[in-house]
Image (spheres, rainbow, N blue to C red):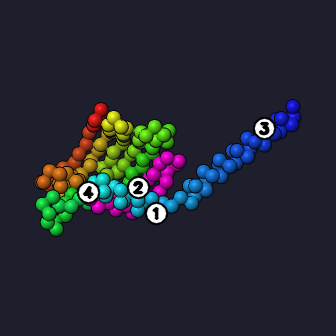
Amino acid sequence: MMSILKHLMKFVGYSLAFTLLTLFFTVLTFPEERLRDYVEIVAGHATGGRVSIAELSLSGIGGVELVDAALKMPSTDGSDKPGGMLQIQHAEASASLFGLMDEVVDATFEATIQGGSVTGGHVVQSAEGLELSIDELSDIRLGTAGLILKSMVGADLRGTLGGKDLKVSYGT
C-alpha cells in the first residue's frame, strides 16, 4: 500500500511541477513586442485606420493590458486632413479560454478612453453574431482631436459621452 501511495505522490508532484514551470516560463518568455506589432497590423486592417500601441503586456493566463493606444482614421474626403482619432489611455481585456475551443470569443474588458472610463464590458462573438454589453460609460470626451465619430458623421461633435447598461446585439 505504501509503494502505491509513494508512486501516486511522485506522479502528482512531477505533473504539478511540469505544469507550473511551463506556465511560468511561457509568461516570462512571451514575445510581447511581436504580439503588439501583430495586433497593430490586424486592428489597422479591421478598422481601416492606423493603430499604434505604446505598451502591450500579458495579464494572467488569458488576458492582455494595453497602455497608450491610438486609432487614427483617414479623412473621408481623400484630403491630407486627419480624420477622427480614438485614444485609449489604458485597457485590460480577458478572454475565456474554454470559449475559444468552441470558436466563440467571450471576453470581458475595462478601459480608460478619451479621458473617460468604460466599466463592466463584456463581448461574445460567435458564428451567429455579436453581443456587447457595457455596465457604464462615463465622461468620454468628444471633440476635434476626439472620437472616430468625426470621420463617420462628417462633423465635429463636442461634449462628453456617458451612460449605463448599454447592450448591442448584431446578427443574432
Where's residue 76, x and y in %?
15, 58
For marks 4 and 2, the one nearer the N-term is 4
- Specify the amino acid type for callout 4: Gly
Contact between marks 4 and 2 (CB within 8 A): the answer is no
Q: Which residues are magenta?
A: 48-70
Q: Residues within 10 Å of mark 3 (few under 14, many from 20)?
A: few
Quadrant the C terminus occupies = top left
Q: Residues within 10 Å of mark 1 (few under 14, many from 20)?
A: few
What residue is at 45 percent from the left and 45 percent from the top? 94
CA separation in Å, label 2 and label 3: 43 Å
Residue topped by disc 4 = 48
For marks 4 and 1, the one nearer the N-term is 1
Residue topped by disc 2 = 66
Q: Residue 121: which quarter of the image?
A: top left
Q: Give the residue furthest to the bottom.
A: 80
Name the front one of labels 1 and 2. Answer: 1
- Specify the amino acid type for callout 1: Glu
Contact between marks 1 and 2 (CB within 8 A): the answer is no
CA separation in Å, label 3 and label 4: 56 Å
Q: Tag 3's secondary structure?
A: helix
Residue topped by disc 1 = 33
- Specify the amino acid type for callout 3: Leu
Name the front one of labels 4 and 1. Answer: 4
Residue topped by disc 3 = 8
Q: Residue 132: which quarter of the image?
A: top left
Nearest the eye: 113 or 18? 18
Name the front one of labels 2 and 3. Answer: 3
What residue is at 30 percent from the left and 53 percent from the top? 46
Mark sitting on residue 93: none
